[in-house]
Image (spheres, rainbow, N blue to C red):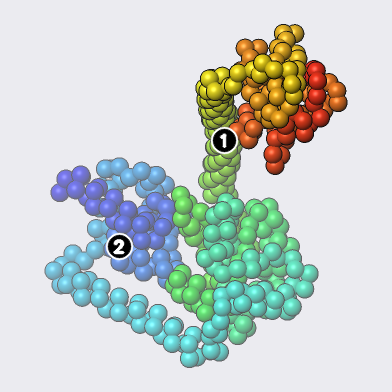
Amino acid sequence: MSEAGPSEHYRDAINQLKEICAITDELALSLLRNANWNVDAAVRNFFEGGNVQDEESDYSEEDAPDAINDNDAQNDIVQSSNNRPQSFFGWITSLISIPMRLILWSLRDLIGFFYNVFGGPPLSVADPRDEIQNFVTEFQRKYDPDGTLPWLNMPYSNAVSEARRQVKYLVVYLHNPSSPSADIFARGYLLSPRFIEFMARNECLIWGASIRTSEGYKVSYSVRDHNTPFISLFCSYDGRTACLIRLSGQFSLDSMLESLEACANLNRHHLATQEREKREREFNNQLRREQEEEYKRSLAADRAKVQERKRLESERIEADKREEELRLQEERKRQLLIERRQRIRESLPEEPCSDVDVVRVAVKFPEGSKLERRFRKDDSLEMLFNVVSIHDTCPHDFSLISSYPRQVLKCAPSWYREYTECFEETDRIPTFREAGLDGGVLVLVRDNEA
C-alpha cells in the first residue's frame, strides 16, 4: 500500500473525530491511537472519559503531529499493526464486537437515565430561571453566605451566550445534593482561596445547577457525564462554545486547579485574540454608527435646505401669482372705470344757461387745475361727481369736499364702491339745495390714494 493512501485515511479519521467531539488535533490523534484508529471507539472513550495516553506513552514527541505528514502516517501503520488481529477469525471477532460495544454504551446511558429519574429524588420541573435562582440562593445559604462566587443567575443557554459576549471563560458546575461529597466539594474546592484566586485571575464567569432540576439534568445529559461533582471549563471558539476540560467524580483540589490553569493558560492567547477582535468590531461598529448618524444628519440638513428652497420658491411663485392677479384686477378695474367715464361724458346734460336757481361751482383738483360749472339747485350731487370724474386730471379714487360749509359731499354713486376705499353708504344722494349749497361754492378734490 502506498504512503498516500494511509495518510489520507488517518487524516480523515482525525478530522471526523474533531468534528464530532470539537477537540484539538493532538487530543484526536491520542484518542485514535488508543482506540487502534477506530473512530467509534475513540468517540466512546472521549465521552466516557476514557484514559488518553500522555507524555509517558510509547509514542515519541515526533509522533504527536501539529500537522501529520506521510512519514508520521507510515509510523502509525507500523505501530498500530502490532495490536490488530492478524487472522481472519480475529477480524470477524472485531467486527462482531463493535455493535455489542455500542449496545453496552447505550445501555449504560439508559441505566443512568432511569437511575436519575427513578433512583434518586425526582427532578423538579419549573422555569429555568426559577431553578437557577433557587440553586444560587440555596448554595449561598448553605455554603457561601458572603456571596463570594459570582454565579450567573440565568439559564445555561443564556450563560453560554453571556460568556461569548464578554469573551471570557465559563466554569460550569453540576451539583448533586444527595451526594456525600457535595458538601466537601462546595466548601473545600469551590470556596477555597486558590479556586477563588483562579477565578479572579482569569476573569472567569461561573454557572451552576443541581442535577435534580430539569435545567441541570439537561446539561448533564448534553455532556454525557452523570458523575458528580462535575466541573468544566468552556471557551468561545469562532462563534461556538467548546468544552476545554471537564472533571467529574473523585479528584483532588490540586489536580483540578492544575488542569483548569493549564487549559486557561493554553487558550489565553486565543481568548486575548478574540477580545482584541471584539474591541475592533465594537470600534468599527461604533465608527460605522457615527458615520451613519453623521450621514443621516447631513442628509436631513440637505433635505431641510431643499424643502426650505422649495418653500421659498413656492411662496415666491404664489406671491407673484397673487401680485399678477391683483395687477390684472386693477387693470380691469381701471379699464372699466375709463369705459364708464366715457359713457358718463356722452350722457352728461348741457350746462344751464339761466342764472335763476343756479349754483356756480368751482372745482379745484389736487395738481392745481380748476373747473367751473353751473348746476341747477335741484340737480343731484351725483351730477357734480360725474362732471368731476370725467376731467382729465381727476384721480381714479377721489372724494369731494365743500369749502363752506366744510363737509365731505356724499355724491358718489353705488357703482363707485368698487373703485374706492372711502365710500360712504347713503340711502339717496341729495340735491344741491338739500346739501345747503347755494350761490358760489368751492369744491376740493381729494386724492384718496395720495
Q: Is residue 33 visible?
A: no
Circle 2 residue: 39
Q: Is residue 134 visible?
A: yes
Question: Which image quadrant is residue 141 in?
Answer: bottom right
Give the left or right position of residue 332, taking residue 46 as reference. Answer: right
Gap between marks 2 and 1 measured at Cα: 63 Å
Q: Residues within 10 Å of mark 1 (few under 14, many from 20)?
A: few
Which percent across, then down, holds residue 45?
38, 68
Circle 1 residue: 300
Q: Is residue 171 above or below residue 386?
A: below
Q: Report the front residue among 20 and 293.
A: 293
Amino acid type at mark 1: Ala
Amino acid type at mark 2: Val
Quarter of the rendering occupied by the C terminus? top right
Q: Report the front residue among 64 and 405.
A: 405
Q: Is residue 13 above or below residue 354?
A: below
